[in-house]
Amino acid sequence: MSEIRAALVGACGKMGSLIIRRILATDGIVLSAAFDLVNIGADVGEVIGAGKLNVPVSDSKDLSSVLKETKTDVLIDFTIAPATAVNAPAAATAGVNLIIGTTGLTAEQKTNITDAVIKNNVAAVISSNYSIGVGVFFKLIKDAAKYLGNDYDVEIIEAHHNQKKDAPSGTAMTAAEIISKEMGGKDLVFGREGLCPRGKEIGIHAVRGGDIVGDHTVMFIGNSERIELHHQAHSREIFVGGAVMAAKWVASQKKGVVYEMSDVLN
């Protein structure tokens, strides 16, 4: 199989630069295009300190035409919801597969992206977390919810750096959805204040501070015991590896389908 040609939105940011470096170090995939709101026209490799790559930073307004000109196979997007809501459908319309790690997307935005994937017959991976460890974490909490059932209260606590814009995190929301489905459907309560007697809901709590990469704890709390499952990210590199793995994987998958990271990890 020929090399996968991957483009990146938000190429000059922290996550973007890490993904580019990982692409450069990975066989079977090359950087075809880079998009950002800054450094337009500059060589993206020189911008991120990786040396000249002969890939200029393009304006996101030109995304569709640049993707076609560069014969890009897959677009990787770890930016912000309003940008992804515009760029993902545009890429799908251009016939480009998608890897989306953006969190905070509304239900309407997700539906619009899914519709664009199906209509234009491309493939996409949309996941709140591209860590392989988090994939295992999701499996463990699903099994715990299955065996513990409604006899245990469930609380989810997540912590991230002080620059994260959305709360709760996408990973916390995915965890809550997995547990709720396994337990037959649960209401979600975001934090608590005042008089709020506990029912059978799932409580979700967000902490923001410093440079925390990402911590997630799920607590199953019974009357005489407590089980805690915890995942802690030490570096953004764990998300980078999964994103590049997914970019290589999605190009050969059935089109018109939206996949999750669990599909990539099989």
Image (spheres, rainbow, N blue to C red):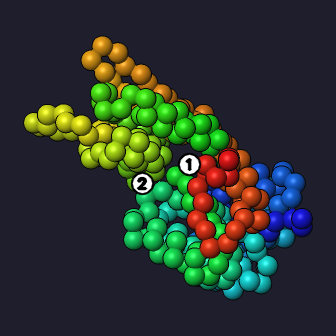
The answer to whether any part of residue 152 appears in the image is: yes
For the residue pair 218 and 200, the one nearer the viewer reads as 200
Residue sitting at x 74%, y 83%: 68
* 90 up-or-down from 235: above or below: below
For the residue pair 43 and 204, the one nearer the viewer reads as 204
* Alpha carbon distance from label 2 to label 1: 16 Å
Name the residue tied to disc 2: 165
Circle number at residue 129: 1
Quadrant of the drawing holding the N terminus:
bottom right
Quarter of the image holding residue 100? bottom right
Residue sitting at x 42%, y 22%: 227
Residue sitting at x 64%, y 52%: 263
> For the residue carrying disc 2, how many other residues have a C-alpha within 10 Å: few (<14), some (14-19), or many (20+)?
few
**Residue 101 appears at what percent x and percent y?**
57, 57
2 or 1: tag closer to the N-terminus: 1
| Element marked by disc 2 | loop
Query: How many discs mark residues in the rendered view?
Result: 2
Compared across the picture, whether 40 is left or right of 89 comes to right
**Residue 237 appears at what percent x and percent y?**
67, 43
* 92 up-or-down from 248: above or below: below
> For the residue carrying disc 1, how many other residues have a C-alpha within 10 Å: few (<14), some (14-19), or many (20+)?
many
**Residue 43 appears at what percent x and percent y?**
77, 69
* 231 up-or-down from 70: above or below: above
Three-letter amino acid code of the residue under disc 1: Asn
Which mark is in front, 2 or 1?
1
